[in-house]
Amino acid sequence: MKEHPPNSRHAAEVVLDDVDVGYSGLRVVHAISLELASGQIGCLLGPSGCGKTTLLRAIAGFEGVMRGEIRLNDQTVSRPGFLLPPEKRNVGMVFQDFALFPHLDVTGNIAFGIRRWKRAERDRRVRELLRLIGLSGYERAYPHALSGGQQQRIALARALAPRPQLLLLDEPFSSMDVELRTDLAREVREILRAEGTTGILVTHDQNEAFAFADRIAVLNAGSLCQWDTAYNLYHKPADRFVAGFVGEGTIVPGRVCAEDCVETALGRIHGPLPGHFTEGSAVDVLVRPDDIELDNASGDIPAEVVAKAFRGADFLYTLRLRDGTELLCVAPSHDNYVVSDHVRLRLGFSHLVVFPRGQGGPQGS
Amino acid sequence: MEHTVTSRARRARTPGLFSRGRPRAWPILSVLIALILALPVLVIFAHVFLPAGDVWLHLRQTLLGEYVRNSLLLVFGVGIGVLVIGIPVAWLVSVCEFPGRRVFQWALMLPLAMPAYIIAYTYTGMLDFTGPVQVLIREITGLGYGQYWFPEIRSLTGAMLMLTLVLYPYVYLLTRAAFLEQSVCVLEVSRTLGSGPYSGFLRVALPLARPAVIAGLTLALMEVLADYGTVAYFGIATFTTGIFRTWYGLADPGAAAQLAAVLLSFVFVLILLERWSRMRARFHHTSSRYSTLPRYRLRGWKAAAAFAACLVPVLLGFLIPAAQLAIWALRTTEQWLTPEFGQLVLNTFYLAALAAVIAVALSLVLAYARRMEGGLITGLAVRVAGMGYAVPGTVIAIGVMLPFAWFDNTLDAFMRTHFGISTGLLLSGTLGALLFAYAVRFLAVSLQTVEAGLGKIKPSMDDAARSLGMRPLATLTRVHLPIMRGTLLTALLLVFVDVLKELPATLILRPFDFNTLAVRAFELAGDERLAESSSAALAIVLVGLLPVILLSLTIERSRPGYKQRSRSQRGRATDEPLALPAGAQAS
């Protein structure tokens, strides 16, 4: 730890190669492979208990791997039987509860990881970071005197101080007000960009993930479902879980009637099918709320309003078709229907998301 | 939540002394400490399997029955006594409102500061023929010697009374804590179902508090079994006095150790009982909603009766004996305000401080090893190392003496035959032996405090420090130690005071001509020089007040609903959960 690794000023390229992590024989995550380019910002997204924090702790070096390999800038830091300890990885971490040292003031906290630097350099670094996080003037404050948001930024500055090649954030916004979260995520993203550090965020909040990350890994029950951009997760979900977890939508059963056509309760939906489906096979179609337009004038599918939620600029309606199928639909808030109103719909699919039926039944939210 | 899953899983991580072939320093260190600290108890237990000598056969035929009978009678009598005093006063101050309740809340703990042997000879001085009480009786009635009946304090009943007066706080403390923890809801429910204060007490509160009552009782009874000073002074033949007699009078260490082993098996039953009751206590938590208990307001004669019920134990258990000690000490200032007394105080403080530092340092290693590894082996090591609190000082002293003497003799013989030099006594009869015994006896006190303090520091602090480049040892010194400064001071203080009061192990193991306050007070009292011994006794009692004050402050603060003034600030001197001063009496 006396010397900084020569590559410490470079943002790390992170590679996870077929990684299993677990404790005492129990595998918590398995067969995870992903690559994050240097300077990019990634996110591990998934519901509680999916193993995303465990995976993050493995990248940090708090847990060993049972299989596979973790590499930072081509240096193997974890493989079975070998674990570079966290203090030697030059990886910064921001904790869910911030974990600021209560016995040290703001300066002491930020300078904790760079105590071996020359004094002048250290002071300059602390000043620079305080400016970056917008907390100049708080040098002598103690953590308990700061607000949650301020503590969070101090924790960020503390983790960034030694110029880590990789910064890990474990649900850092979960204790914040919901309205603040996406703002903070965007702010932290700017700070990471300014520092030129590779970053990985763990969260269960997709809005946070969308605001923060270049690439997102969706995890479910210890497995990686998809490692992709936010746009692709929403529009080209790899499986039902991703489809249900990211964004809103309904699964509607259907039957393939041509190469680019599915027959459903909504009628025939046209569009290119992902992958190969034989004609007549039973499928499920993902219907996003923006795939349907509410149009009483030219719509041709009758439906009834079952519920509605006001969301400011628009309404999210829950609609029921004649055959009982329920759908979600977004409509501008100047069209104000009430529950039990009869409306007409029009299809507005730009592409089709279709899963073969019989994979554990339809899912969706 | 995921977070808890992670930390629980982390606790269960592969335990062991080796990691991929490399030894792991912290668990190995903790196991080593535990083994060394377990040595005295192991030595005693080993004697169960040794062939019995003549002295043991003699003991078994003559005195063992008396030892067992007296010890059991004492346990039985004191057990009833502490329950009869401890439970009602705990109920009164936690559920009723009457004049003086707030003061009694802490005043009822004062007898904890009074070692049993001190209260015993103070009352003897007050109640014997020439004491102030009998003089007054004779003056009033005009009767002379032998013309009236007066109870003999130096008897088994007297010993029960003395021990009860200083040990009831254990039951009081734990029972009160249980009453305060009981959710107000259950008591309110019982009130809406028509239970008045008495039936509410009998049908709801007491059954819920039962595990706590049993835990307090077992702690008090361990002290009874450990007591040497009181029974020795009163001339009652129990296990502890029997061990002394066998060791010094019959000069048979083996038989003494076997006697100690029998005593230890009695203690073991108490340990099991305590473990069991604490385990059950976890299931007796009703709900986590707390609010200040609405107290039953007592008026008129009821208030007066409650007041009296609380006053009597405080008066008899602390105020009267402390006042008597103070009077004696003031009357004899010219006898003890001497350089010798100063030297005695210095000696004692030096010894106690040294022992406290050792105990806290060992506790830190054990607690930190367990925090980092959390494996089965370190957990077991911590358990074993903390066992000493239940083992009587007499037993530990014998258990230290035997292996040390064996080592000295063997080494001496070896050096003589091979090198022609005599090494003499290297270990036995040194301060080192005494300090070792203290560490065995009192480690649990500091360990409990340190573990509680460490437990308050979130595991993410460790992770944060390590991700910022700290190795485990650096994390301990730069993060944990500064944060838990207050806890460490508390732990130091608790061990310090316990060592100050300790009598039997010190009597056996002290170096020749080395005296402590406790030994001095006991010896002078044994020579019927009560007034002269009062200065040393008073010093012990006054220092003993410190942890009692600390304890009452802690309880006040840990109470649900206590306003968290400046709690997160830097001065955290006393807001740690205190170890119950196990071994507080140590007589």
Image (cartoon, helix red, strand yellow):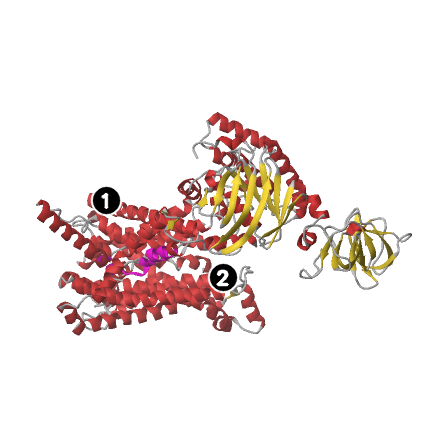
Range of magenta residues:
B379-397
Q: Residue B503: x, y in percent? A: 25, 56
User: Does the magenta segment cover residue A14?
Assistant: no
Q: Secondary structure at mark 2?
A: helix
Q: Residue A297: x, y in percent? A: 91, 52
Q: Residue furthest front?
A: A278
| First-in-chain label (2 vs 1) | 2
Residue for point 71% across, 55% down: A355
Kind of residue at disc 2: Glu
In the image, residue B316 sits, relative to residue A90, either above or below, namely below
Residues beneath discs 2 and 1 located on the same chain: yes
* Chain of the residue under the numbered disc 2 shown in the image: B
**Between residues B272 and B298, which one lies in front from this camera angle?**
B272
Pick the quarter of the image with the N terminus of chain B: bottom right
**Is most of the magenta stretch helix, strand or loop?**
helix
**Between residues B68 and B562, which one lies in front from this camera angle?**
B68
